[in-house]
Image (cartoon, rainbow, N blue to C red):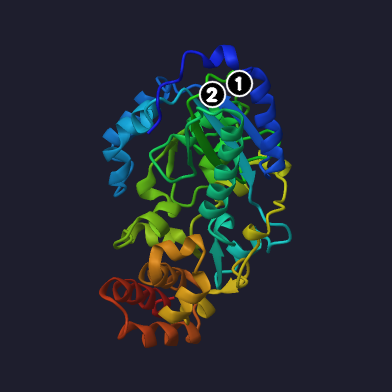
Amino acid sequence: MMRTMQIGHPYETDFSALAGRIRQWAQELGFQSVGITDTGLSEAEPRLRDWLARGMNGAMDYMANNADKRAHPEALVPGVLRVISLRMDYLPPGVADSWQVLADGERAFVSRYALGRDYHKLMRQRLAVFAGRIRNEIADFEGRVFTDSAPVMEVELARKAGLGWRGKHTLLLSRESGSWFFLGEIFVNLPLPVDPPAAAHCGNCTRCIEICPTQAIVAPYRLDARRCISYLTIELKGSIPLELRSLIGNRVYGCDDCQLVCPWNSFAHATAENDFYPRHGLDDVTLLELFAWDEATFQARMAGSAIYRIGYEQWQRNLAVALGNAPKRGEIIAALQQRRDSASALVSEHVDWALSRQLNK
């Protein structure tokens, strides 16, 4: 737990100079951008509360259970004075063209952030090294690192820290790198100088709203997670609503459509991190090949991947839906029929739906 900042620190340490070294360390450790902000989220909290009151978090109960900590960083980490927000690009170079994969109903589309190793581990390790460098400079430094691992309003803190602005799809956008990046934070007990927030540059563009396959972006800056394909294929553990299954297409883990169509992503840079490069050909693989995996194969090949977290049953559920949406083929029907009897109740339900779709095309 953090202690309150000692009174003598401002007189013993040049925090402006330390902030300069923090920017240098960020570059050395492979982060593409860094900003510093205070912990005030009074503007964002009413939007969070309204979103939760409307039930748009769906089955993500943890969003509501930890709302106070999410809106008040000092409740999560007592003694925090500043948040260091960092960005790391993840788009791998040379991957199969996303639009071409999406257009081929027999291929599987995996969100580009999940093609390689689980980003949590790499980001957490780098952030821990980063925090260690600060600790070497300031004896009384205390801090905690986060990357999508706690009730933290990452996008709002990054926006306040000047890393970008919240796009109409609710993701953070950068003029230099679009949105193909991960965010991480270091909560610190140091009175570092803060950076100004970035100005918004979406203008009148609504491409992300119009492209969403399930119309989950119900208004600018408002996402109904219950309709979002990323939520349906990753967060939702049970049955996918019938009315949304046909809209999922061949997206078996996540959805990138709102990012693919965003003009700002024309400025995105490919990552230099090998850990984010595709594994097992996941950027260009057929649905039937993935559906043929048994549980042992899934566990072996997805070990160390973000996909591993959803488990084999949910993976099969997603693939069954995508096969139901695929063009009619005898091989697909045979694969579904073969899996039906040995599958769990959850997977069998989606296999039966897929078979009905295939047989009636």
To which residue does mark 2 refer?
37
Look at label 1 and name its amino acid: Asp
Residue 203's quadrant in the figure? top right
Front residue of 106/309: it is: 309
Look at label 2 and name its amino acid: Thr
Residue 310's quadrant in the figure? bottom left
Residue at point 60%, 26% (across, down): 162
Is there any visible trace of residue 104 in the rendered image?
yes
Residue at point 30%, 44% (across, down): 62
Q: Position of residue 122 (x, y in %)?
A: 57, 53
User: Is residue 107 depicted above or below 194 in this figure?
Assistant: below
Is there any visible trace of residue 47 in the rendered image?
no
To which residue does mark 1 refer?
195
How packed mark 2 is, by other alpha carbons closer than 10 Å (few <14, some 14-19, many 20 or more), is many
Q: Position of residue 120 (x, y in %)?
A: 51, 52
Do the residues bearing badges 2 and 1 touch, measured as CB atoms within 8 Å? yes
Screen quadrant of the N terminus: top left
Front residue of 279/104: it is: 279
Circle on res. 234: none
Front residue of 116/349: it is: 116
Q: Position of residue 128 (x, y in %)?
A: 55, 44
User: Is residue 350 depicted above or below 11 in this figure?
Assistant: below
Distance from the alpha carbon under mark 2 to that under mark 1:
6 Å
Residue at point 49%, 56% (across, down): 254
Whichever of callouts 2 and 1 sits on the residue coming sooner in the sequence is: 2
How packed mark 1 is, by other alpha carbons closer than 10 Å (few <14, some 14-19, many 20 or more), is some
User: Is residue 110 depicted above or below 89 in this figure?
Assistant: below
Asked if residue 273 lies left or right of residue 200, the reply is right
Screen quadrant of the C terminus: bottom left
